[in-house]
């Protein structure tokens, strides 16, 4: 019987140290993202054992619980409801988690891999606790809540494009274009609001300052001898404007008398940050945004296969280092500028290599029933772009399959990059999904059909190379006694 979202949330809360230990709650496409006050009170192994949990990723003071597309939204809502309740009942949490079944001999290697995965996660959490990576995580927290709207609008934009190209339903396509474009026209406001919220300011003040970026009246303002354009600087300008607003607001809070705070603080915040946005930040962010778009196009047109090989091959290590979060503003900038990001389809090839490597391990481990069961249960999620169960449960603890998965991703990225050199660019109208789930969001300079065909070829290449590289280099016969696991460390 499938566990309800409430049951999952109720089972998780006590294992996380209770309501007092939760500092923030958010979710992305597949993960429940929780801010944790005291990591020592979290029973990570028990969390991983809760039915419905696909994996756990530790990232500094943030705990990311992989639940899967769709289900994570319902679980997050129930979790927030439990936290906001004035009187939480102890009944749902009084029962201890179900005990694990006794391990059979063929489950020993799976147990060792799980333990090794936990060690790697803990070690990576320590490595990720740096000021730079903390800043990147907080910037990611600004953009992650926007992903559902990006996906919804991206799918509608793709559908509208198909209808226009086919000449169908001409009365509907203008409405679809308005629905799909409305959010993107005001995305800077949402970025400003979330920035202030994440960095400790008043959200509506961050949104108010960021709204300047998209206000049509900025065309009457001249900065550095050039008239500004509405939207100049995009999300990067909005991010910078809101960050400045937070700094100004904090400065005012410590100096303005309480009796005047409600009047002076918001006024000074909006005025100072607004003038700085008009006469500096928009212009500078516009230069950076233009450079990002130009660099991305040049990279693919000039060095397509090499760029694809590097991006597809290094994305899994970037995820392990926590540096992939720096790409989120870049993706959003490209989508705002060009209508799609050309980087995401290349990076998605890393997931294809991961699936191919996991399939090879499955074939090699003919006698390890437990680990084969783990791979079987995680593969559907991997095909849809949720790679954490395979990464932390199989390839990374084994070592060598993680490297061969990277090789598969590199091959798939090179395949897609090769067509970019020929003039066929593949892009995604939103960020978040990958694997097969990315197909509804694909488009390109020559239409979605060709983009989907090239992307499918890249996936098949990633699957094949990841499988072959793993199958030929990984000796699975000795995993059961632990010797191959020792060799791969």
Image (cartoon, rainbow, N blue to C red):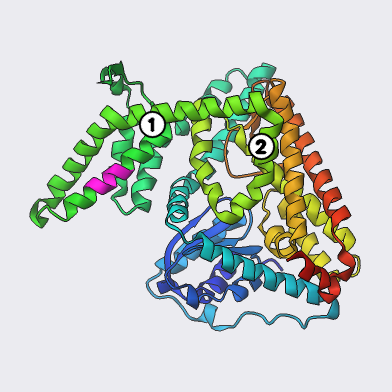
Q: Which residues are magenta?
A: 243-248
Asked whether the residues under the numbered discs 2 and 1 touch, taking CB atoms below 8 Å apart as contact, a structural biologist would say: no
Q: Quadrant of the N terminus?
A: bottom right
Q: Which mark is residue 387?
A: none
Magenta: predominant secondary structure element?
helix
Disc 2 packing (10 Å; few <14; some 14–19; many ≥20): many
Q: Which mark is residue 345?
A: 2
Which quadrant of the view contains residue 161?
top right
Q: Quadrant of the C terminus?
A: bottom right
Instruction: Return the x and y of residue 84 as percentages of the image width and height.
Output: 40, 66
Q: Is residue 483 left or right of residue 93?
A: right
- Give the number of callouts: 2
Q: Residue at x 80, y 50 (%)?
A: 356
Residue 30 in view in this figure:
no
- The answer to whether residue 414 is above or below residue 247 is above
Q: Residue at x 61, y 32 (%)?
A: 342
Pick whichever, 479 or 340, lies toward us: 479
Q: Residue at x 54, y 78 (%)?
A: 92
Residue assigned mark 1: 285
Q: Earlier in the sequence, mark 2 or mark 1?
A: 1
């Amino acid at each position: 019987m499938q566990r309800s979202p409430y049951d999952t949330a109720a089972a998780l809360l006590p294992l996380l140290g209770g309501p007092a230990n939760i500092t923030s709650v958010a979710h992305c496409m597949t993960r429940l993202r929780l801010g944790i006050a005291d990591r020592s009170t979290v029973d990570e192994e028990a969390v991983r054992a809760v039915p419905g949990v696909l994996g756990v990723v530790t990232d500094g003071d943030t705990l990311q619980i992989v639940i899967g597309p769709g289900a994570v939204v319902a679980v997050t809502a129930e979790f927030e409801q439990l936290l906001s309740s004035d009187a939480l009942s102890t009944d749902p949490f009084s029962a201890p988690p179900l005990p694990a079944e006794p391990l059979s001999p063929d489950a020993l290697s799976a147990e060792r891999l799980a333990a090794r995965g936990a060690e790697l996660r803990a070690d990576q959490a320590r490595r990720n606790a740096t000021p730079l990576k903390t800043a990147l995580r907080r910037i990611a927290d600004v953009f992650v809540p926007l992903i559902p709207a990006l996906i919804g609008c991206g799918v509608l934009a793709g559908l509208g494009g198909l209808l226009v190209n086919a000449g169908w339903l001409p009365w509907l396509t203008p409405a679809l274009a308005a629905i799909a474009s409305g959010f993107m026209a005001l995305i800077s406001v949402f970025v400003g609001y979330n920035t202030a919220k994440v960095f400790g300011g008043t959200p509506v003040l961050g949104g108010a300052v960021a709204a300047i970026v998209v206000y049509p009246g900025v065309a009457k303002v001249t900065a550095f001898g050039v008239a500004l354009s509405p939207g100049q600087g995009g999300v990067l300008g909005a991010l910078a404007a809101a960050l400045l607003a937070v700094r100004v607001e904090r400065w005012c809070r410590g100096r303005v008398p309480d009796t005047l705070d409600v009047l002076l603080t918001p006024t000074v915040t909006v005025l100072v940050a607004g003038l700085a946005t008009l006469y500096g930040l928009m212009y500078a962010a516009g230069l950076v945004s233009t450079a990002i778009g130009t660099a991305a196009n040049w990279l693919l047109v000039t060095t397509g296969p090499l760029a694809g090989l590097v991006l597809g091959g290094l994305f899994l290590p970037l995820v392990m280092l926590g540096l992939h979060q720096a790409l989120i503003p870049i993706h959003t900038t490209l989508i705002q500028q060009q209508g799609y990001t050309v980087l995401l389809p290349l990076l998605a090839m890393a997931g294809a290599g991961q699936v191919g490597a996991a399939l090879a391990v499955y074939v090699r481990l003919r006698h390890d029933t437990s680990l084969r069961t783990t791979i079987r249960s995680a593969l559907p999620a991997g095909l849809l772009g949720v790679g954490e169960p395979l990464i932390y449960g199989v390839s990374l603890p084994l070592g060598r399959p993680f490297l061969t998965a990277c090789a598969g991703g590199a091959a798939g990225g090179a395949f897609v990059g090769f067509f970019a050199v020929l003039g066929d660019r593949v892009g995604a109208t939103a960020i978040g999904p990958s694997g097969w789930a990315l197909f509804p969001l694909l488009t390109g300079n020559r239409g979605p059909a060709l983009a989907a065909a090239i992307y499918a070829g890249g996936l098949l290449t990633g699957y094949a190379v990841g499988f072959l590289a793993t199958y030929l280099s990984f000796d699975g016969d000795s995993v059961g006694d632990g010797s191959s696991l020792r060799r791969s460390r």
